[in-house]
Image: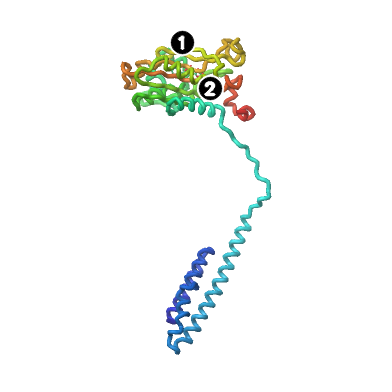
Amino acid sequence: MLDQLEKLAARASAELQKIASLEDLEGWRVSYLGRKSRLIEILRSLGDVAVEERRELGSRANQLKNSLESQLSIKKERLEQALHQLLEHNKIDITLPGEPYQPGNLHLTTKTVKEICDIFVSMGFQVVEGPEVEWERYNFEMLNMPAGHPARDGFATLWVDYQTKTGARPMLMRTHTSPTQPRVMEKSSPPIRVVAPGRVYRYEATDATHEWMFSQVEGFAIDKNITMADLKGTLFEFARRLFGQDRKCRFRVDYFPFVEPGCEIAIDCFMCGGKGCRLCKESGWIEILGAGMIHPEVLRGCGIDPDEYSGFAFGMGVERIPILRYGIDDIRLFYSNDLRFLKQF
Ligand code: FA5
């Protein structure tokens, strides 16, 4: 028994040295000095021990109990001191004034894209995104604009400096969001109803209504028996929801190689009320989107049979919508990072 006590003393002291937290110290106390600990058990059972042995064992057990108790209180004091120092060191003065911070807000373009997409989502369209650095194949060829097609000139292109082994340079900054059409068509089959927002790039001189980088939202629907009436109904409903019933919409024939027939929608100029001004280039109208029935060749090129399916597509300039709504007279304000402008929306 005496031998057991000595081993217990050695183990308890060794363990105590390793303890680094008050929680662990409490655990140590319970196992060596708690009611169910071996030491207390020995003390409790002294009555059953032979008289000759009892005195020595009792005195050693009590000695050990006192020693462990004093080691415990020294350790506790040290740990509390260390904790106190740590808290003092990291003390936060909550009475000091806070650092002022400027709350941010979403960019006007981001908000508008979200609003446009929400309208189409409520009509059953799904939102997808395509890459901004695009292959010539998707941006032009699969949209019925093979190399040398004159319509390519309308999309003043920023080419990426990347050359294939054969010397071709097929990579570009997408000039419109229409490449999402072949990308989606290749991977899925009708019925398809998709809107695809994103940034596009054009190598062109900037003015009040033209930027070299701007945003578009593409939309297209492909199914059996889709007609021009579906396109018109969808876009008029969209324009009414976005601009209200009062704004006038003009639906006019236009040409894009990837649709047949093609059209454009314009909204009457808010600034001059349709009389003609700098913003609308004296026309009274601001064009917001191009659209049409997807060309059968485009469908066929993506593995969709044009005798069975038809579809409509549209692509709108995002910035032109807040321009119309809030009377912003220069598109260049959007990306010149002037917080006085951006914080208004
Ligand atoms: C296109 O980009 C076609 N991909 C649209 C389309 C899609 C037609 C599907 C048919 C079917 P366009 O180049 O016209 O078309 O551009 C579409 C819209 O983007 C324009 O109506 C205009 O609102 C906006 N936009 C065009 N160029 C600029 C520019 N430089 N800065 C700001 N917005 C522009």
Q: Answer yes or no: is residue 160 visible.
A: no
Instruction: Report x, y in % for residue 136.
Output: 40, 22
Which element carries disc 1, helix, strand or loop? strand
- Give the number of the mark in front: 1 or 2: 2
Which element carries disc 2, helix, strand or loop? helix
Query: What type is the residue that disc 2 sits on?
Result: Leu
Is disc 1's CB within 8 Å of ligand 1? no
Instruction: Report x, y in % for residue 154.
Output: 47, 15
Q: Is residue 281 above or below residue 70?
A: above
Q: Quadrant of the N terminus?
A: bottom left
Instruction: Report x, y in % for residue 107.
Output: 56, 30
Is disc 2's CB within 8 Å of ligand 1? no
Query: What type is the residue that disc 1 sits on?
Result: Val
Q: Is residue 168 above or below residue 42?
A: above
Disc on res. 242: 2
* Residue shown at the point (54%, 15%) measured from the top left: 267
Left or right: residue 317 compared with residue 163: right
Left or right: residue 279 compared with residue 196: right
Which quarter of the picture shows residue 108?
top right
Q: Quadrant of the C terminus?
A: top right
Earlier in the chain: of badge 1 and badge 2, it is: 2
Q: Residues within 10 Å of mark 1 (few under 14, many from 20)?
A: few
Q: Answer yes or no: is residue 154 visible.
A: yes
Q: Residues within 10 Å of mark 2 (few under 14, many from 20)?
A: some
Q: Identify the residue position indicated by label 1 in the image.
A: 253
In the image as oriented, which residue stretches furthest toward the front? 245
Instruction: Report x, y in % for residue 33.
Output: 50, 73
- Measure the alpha-carbon separation of dots 1 and 2: 22 Å
Q: In this figure, what is the number of numbered marks?
A: 2
Disc on res. 34: none
Which quarter of the picture shows residue 131?
top left
